[in-house]
Amino acid sequence: MSDLMQEPIEQAQSPLAEAWGMFKRNHAAVAALGVLALIVLGAIFGPYIYPTDPFEMVWAPFSPPGQEGYLLGTDYLGRDLLAMIINGARVSLMIGLAAAVVSIFIGVTVGALAGFYRGWVEEVLMRITEFFQVLPTLLFSMVLVALFGASLPMITFAIGVVSWTAVARITRSEFLRIRELEYVKASRASGASNRKLMFGVILPNALPPIIVQSALMVGSAILFEAGLSFLGLTDPNVVSWGQIIGSNRQYILDAGYTVTIPGIAIFVTVLAISLVGDGLNDALNPKLRQR
């Protein structure tokens, strides 16, 4: 009798609760989510807890970590590396999130239009997608930043505009699959407009793989910004992890910690985002939930 009563309760479990239960089974993803939460909290509240100006020259250049009370040492100008890491976290995460939003907006728009309308619309949009896909992304973003300036919005736009093709292809494939399902045909028969069908019926059901890809794109954008900064294509008036590496790259053999520490920060953050993305894939993939 108890088994019969328990079964309806399990069946009544909401999809969100079911997804969270599946996510919790991935212990690496849960641990990564905790690490990522600490990084985000540090980026938000760190500058208030440790209110040192990251551009202020506080001590002699290249002071090793721990010397004179500076936990992570100083860089080539004598700036507090800990203050730079804390303040750089906010900028690096902001660039990652903003660039991912730009990529998602472009990719979902292109993929949705191509998958829904098909025909010549799909043909044109997919040729444009293939054109961007074969472009050397780093070189193209370098050209954009070099032409229009190395401001923070331009760097974010340059990263986002070269990274949307994967989202477009995933969105298109989901739209092609879902548009032929019975509930979509029923909505179309009831007189729903194309706009409502695309964004009110199909897109919500196509979100799981898009969400997973979006999470991974945040980490890719952080790495992308670090690559541009390493090449000197960054805003010198803004501190980011990539900018710290780029400004100290000439002294990597003399004071390797000035590059290693922000490199570790990038590595840990991107790894955490990737593991969270794997957990989201497990949680949002219906085939995996049925195991």
Image (cartoon, rainbow, N blue to C red):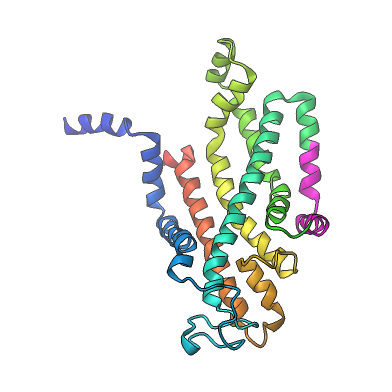
**Image point (56%, 33%), residue name:** 206
Position above or below: 95 against 198: below
Q: Is residue 51 left or right of residue 195?
A: left
Q: Position of residue 28 (x, y in %)?
A: 43, 59
Quadrant of the drawing holding the N terminus: top left
**Image point (66%, 65%), residue name:** 226
Residue 6: quarter of image: top left
Q: Nearer the viewer, residue 234 or 199?
A: 234
Q: Position of residue 253 (x, y in %)?
A: 67, 86
Which region shows up in magenta?
Answer: 127-148
Q: Is residue 225 left or right of residue 48?
A: right
Residue 141 colored in magenta in the image: yes
* Outermost left residue: 1
Q: Position of residue 283 (x, y in %)?
A: 45, 44
Q: Position of residue 135 (x, y in %)?
A: 80, 51
Residue 19 colored in magenta in the image: no
**Image point (44%, 60%), residue name:** 41
Q: Nearer the viewer, residue 195 or 247?
A: 247
